[in-house]
Image (cartoon, rainbow, N blue to C red):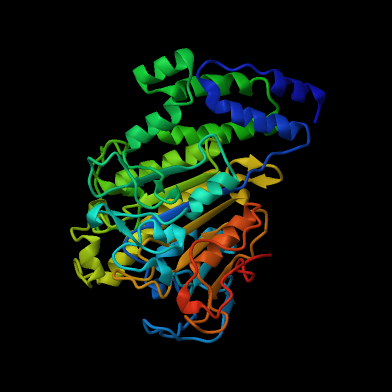
């Protein structure tokens, strides 16, 4: 790469509004000097109401039935996904099957169970109540809070999500930095947009942002000016960044594009950033989360889909469902679809949004690969294995490998609770911390029901 190109990147000036481009140009400059920056990123997608383990089983796998008690299978199941068909709800991420790892059999008994495990889901600690039982006490840090310290960004952690109550702007439901130190989940996309992208605009740009909510106009002008001075490689990368931000300008619902819904096809004119339809708002939050990652605002993102005990009974009206998740959890059907069908329709929508996030990260070059190569996405439910969970199992889907540090493209099913080789969600969280560069070997609370087990260390079967 020529000195001229390095000088162009180093000397490039930006307008008042393009502080969002500073991390991007800094990354390109470092790359031009032969020291590409590739920060590790972690995304958690937490859906309410449980994930029945059988819903994540790929084709050709007969999963041994596990009773809701200690015991069950004694052997680890470790199978490649290459020649297997993913379950219906995971089909949107099938093109990245070599980066998908389905993890079954982990327990989280310390969390207690119920309709939601709240902060315990990402914390692997015990439940407790404060303020007369109204709010859940937080016994420690959650994994996203711990990772925010390990791989800090401009915003150490960003929490976005939806609540069943449209009026909820910010809630505290699943993330924390320590005992009784909850992290916020922003539930209104319009407020999240202003908070994240208005906060980093200064001077005249901030005044313009507050007046017009249009910081992207400044970015577009800067990208166009930069493109005239950069070679093809850097120009392509800037174009990929801009494409991600352009998504934020499309404020219209994209539900017509989503397959496997029960809604009738028809024109959608809803502004998804201010929509009262939960699927619109979740779509917008994924757009905002992708933009926050791409422009370097954060390395740790948590997207909450009505997680927490106050929102678990949300109704996904945008998918054409007029039955809430509480009723579905109790076996409720709708329009000749069983509760399992409805679970899968809702989960598939989430994986459609996850696939969109992966596409955006994959389009942005970084180092010798793409942003997706340096990102881990973990999907799980705050409700563990079912509607009335007892946390004997906690199914998860892990997407990505962070520079081939994980063995992916696999289906793993650990031995049952109390059996030799059994592992817990805490071991999964230690695995993620190790990927972030931490040397910690434990997380959360020890399960006294497994007192004869070594509950330390990562899931060695996952590590490359």
The C terminus lies in which quarter of the figure? bottom right
Image quadrant assignment for residue 29: top right
The N terminus lies in which quarter of the figure? top right
Q: Position of residue 38 (x, y in %)?
A: 66, 43
In the displayed structure, does residue 322 sit left or right of residue 212?
left
In the displayed structure, does residue 277 sit left or right of residue 105?
left
Vertical position of residue 134 compared to residue 102: above or below: above
Nearer the observer, 215 or 240: 215
Q: Position of residue 341 (x, y in %)?
A: 30, 69
Give the residue at x 32% y 36%: 273
Nearer the observer, 263 or 67: 67
Numbered circles on residues, count: 0
Q: Residue furthest top?
A: 204
Give the residue at x 52% y 54%: 377
User: Is residue 208 in view from this perspective?
Assistant: yes
Image quadrant assignment for residue 452: bottom right
Q: Position of residue 281 (x, y in %)?
A: 32, 43
Give the residue at x 22% y 40%: 167
Q: Position of residue 106 (x, y in %)?
A: 49, 72
In the displayed structure, does residue 223 sit left or right of residue 395?
right
In the displayed structure, does residue 137 sit left or right of residue 441?
left
User: Is residue 250 in view from this perspective?
Assistant: no
């Amino acid at each position: 790469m020529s000195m001229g190109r390095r000088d162009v990147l180093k000397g490039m000036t930006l307008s008042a509004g393009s502080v969002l481009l500073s991390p991007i140009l800094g990354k390109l400059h470092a790359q031009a000097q032969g020291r590409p920056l590739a920060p590790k990123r972690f995304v958690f997608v937490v859906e309410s109401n449980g994930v029945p383990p059988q819903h994540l089983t790929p084709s050709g796998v007969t999963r041994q039935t596990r009773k809701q008690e200690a015991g069950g299978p004694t052997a680890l199941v470790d199978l490649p996904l290459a020649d297997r068909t993913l379950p219906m709800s995971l089909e949107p991420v099938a093109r990245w099957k070599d980066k998908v790892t389905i993890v079954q059999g982990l327990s989280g008994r310390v969390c207690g169970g119920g309709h939601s495990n709240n902060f315990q889901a990402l914390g692997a600690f015990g439940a407790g109540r404060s303020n007369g039982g109204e709010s859940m006490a937080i016994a420690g840090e959650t994994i996203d809070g711990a990772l925010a310290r390990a791989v800090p960004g401009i915003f150490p952690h960003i929490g976005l999500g939806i609540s069943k109550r449209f009026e909820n702007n910010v809630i505290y439901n699943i993330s924390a930095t320590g005992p009784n130190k909850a992290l916020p989940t922003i539930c209104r996309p319009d407020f999240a947009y202003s908070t994240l992208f208005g906060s980093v605009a200064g001077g005249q740009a901030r005044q313009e942002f507050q007046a017009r909510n249009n910081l992207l106009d400044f970015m577009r002008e800067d990208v166009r000016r930069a493109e005239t001075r950069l070679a093809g490689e850097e120009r392509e990368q800037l174009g990929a960044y801009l494409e991600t931000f352009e998504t934020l300008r499309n404020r219209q619902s994209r539900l017509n594009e989503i397959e496997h819904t029960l809604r009738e096809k028809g024109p959608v004119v809803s502004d998804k950033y201010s929509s009262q339809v939960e699927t619109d708002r979740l779509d917008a939050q994924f757009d905002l989360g992708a933009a926050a990652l791409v422009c370097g605002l954060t390395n740790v993102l948590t997207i909450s889909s009505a997680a927490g005990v106050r929102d678990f009974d949300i109704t996904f009206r945008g998918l054409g469902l007029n039955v809430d998740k509480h009723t579905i959890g109790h076996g409720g059907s709708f329009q000749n679809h069983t509760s399992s069908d409805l679970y899968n329709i809702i989960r598939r929508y989430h994986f459609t949004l996850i696939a969109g996030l992966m596409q955006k990260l994959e389009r942005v070059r970084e180092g010798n690969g793409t942003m997706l190569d340096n990102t881990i996405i973990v999907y799980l439910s705050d409700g563990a294995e079912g509607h009335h969970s007892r946390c004997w199992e906690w199914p998860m889907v892990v997407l990505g490998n962070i520079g081939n540090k994980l063995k992916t493209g696999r289906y793993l099913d650990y031995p049952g609770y109390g059996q030799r080789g059994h592992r817990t969600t805490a071991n999964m969280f230690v695995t993620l911390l190790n990927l972030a560069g931490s040397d910690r070997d434990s997380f959360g609370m020890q399960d006294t029901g497994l007192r004869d087990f070594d509950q330390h260390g990562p899931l060695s079967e996952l590590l490359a």
